[in-house]
Image (tube, rainbow, N blue to C red):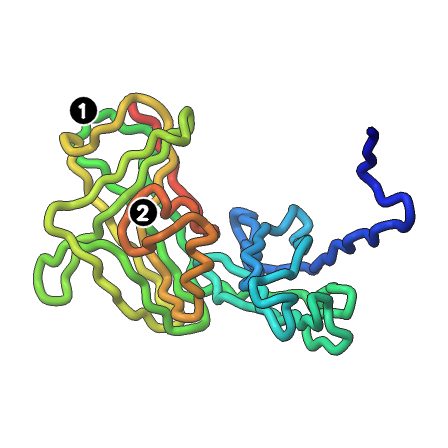
Amino acid sequence: MFSCTTNPFWDDPSTKIMRLTGTVHPEDNLTNTPAYVWLEGLEIDTVTNDNKEFLIEINSTQTPAGNINGPLKIYFYLHNYRISHATIYFTDGHFSDSQTDFSSDGELLEPIALEKLVSAETLLPSVFRPALIETLRIKLDLEVHNSTTRLIGYKKVLAQNTYLPSGVIFRSLEDEGDIYINRLYNDSIVPIEYSAGSALTWLYEIDSDSLQLSQGEYEVFPFFLVEQNQVPENLFFSLGIDNTININAHYLKLPMDMVPGFLTVQ
């Protein structure tokens, strides 16, 4: 008795790996955050490299209904940029000869330019000594660019049209799993629409008694969201985010060109 793992009479055809390639240019990307690239329908994702290039390998186009026929969208995403997409067409599981955004070999015909909606920078003292300083003041400078944009954040309502910003995430630089979230009591989600060209500052004031941070170094991220109804819900799921509104550690998974603050607690 003996066996073999290859067919002695003919060669099985090898599976051809299909590749989607191209470049993504986010304008004014201060932190060099890579763009997130997600192929809807096949749930394949990647990020751009240092040269702003992406590569998606497609090993299978099989679905319960058979080979894919028709269009699928590839999304290009950074949270504070306008989301963009391109379309790839399939015929019986292979790239169609007729394409609009890609060549028949899967090469993006024109680079994707991502429009920046909002710039964000966090400013705060570099050193904080809770025993000596009663209040930690954190500024989030926001600049709305060329389009009217709705920003969402936690705020405590003080009076009509008067709000005190709330919601700051501290991530330890020594242990990325060590995350502390500070919020004001009785705050709530408040969406506010800002016109193009707006420059604004959200000022967070945190009592040292409520800041339960151990000594060490931290990255500081005030919580805010840029509303975009065009972002598919499954894109967030692919990032491991099941709820974008509630402030939690998943917020740090959002790809975003945001300049964080840095704080040493002594």
Q: Quadrant of the C terminus?
A: top left
Q: For this rendering, which residue is in front, 83 or 126? A: 83
Q: Is residue 241 rendered to the left or right of residue 55?
A: left
Residue 187: give x, y in percent of width and height.
15, 52
Q: For this rendering, which residue is in front, 122 or 81? A: 81
Q: Is residue 18 rendered to the left or right of residue 4?
A: left
Q: Distance between the residues labelled 1 and 2?
A: 23 Å
Name the outermost residue toward the front.
1
Q: Identify the image quadrant of residue 56.
A: bottom right
Residue found 17% across the figure and 56% down from its top = 188
Residue 80: give x, y in percent of width and height.
44, 59
**Residue 4 shows in this picture:** yes
Q: Nearer the viewer, mark 1 or mark 2?
A: 2
Q: What residue type is labelled 1?
A: Leu
Q: For this rendering, which residue is in front, 167 or 62? A: 62
Q: Which amino acid does label 2 sit on?
A: Pro
Q: In this view, does 88 lie above or below 162?
A: below
Residue found 35% across the figure and 67% down from its top = 198
Q: Circle 1 sits on which residue? A: 132
Mark 2 secondary-structure assignment: strand
Residue found 50% across the figure and 66% down from its top = 83
Q: Circle 2 sits on which residue? A: 222
Q: Identify the image quadrant of residue 250.
A: top left
Residue 125: give x, y in percent of width and height.
32, 35
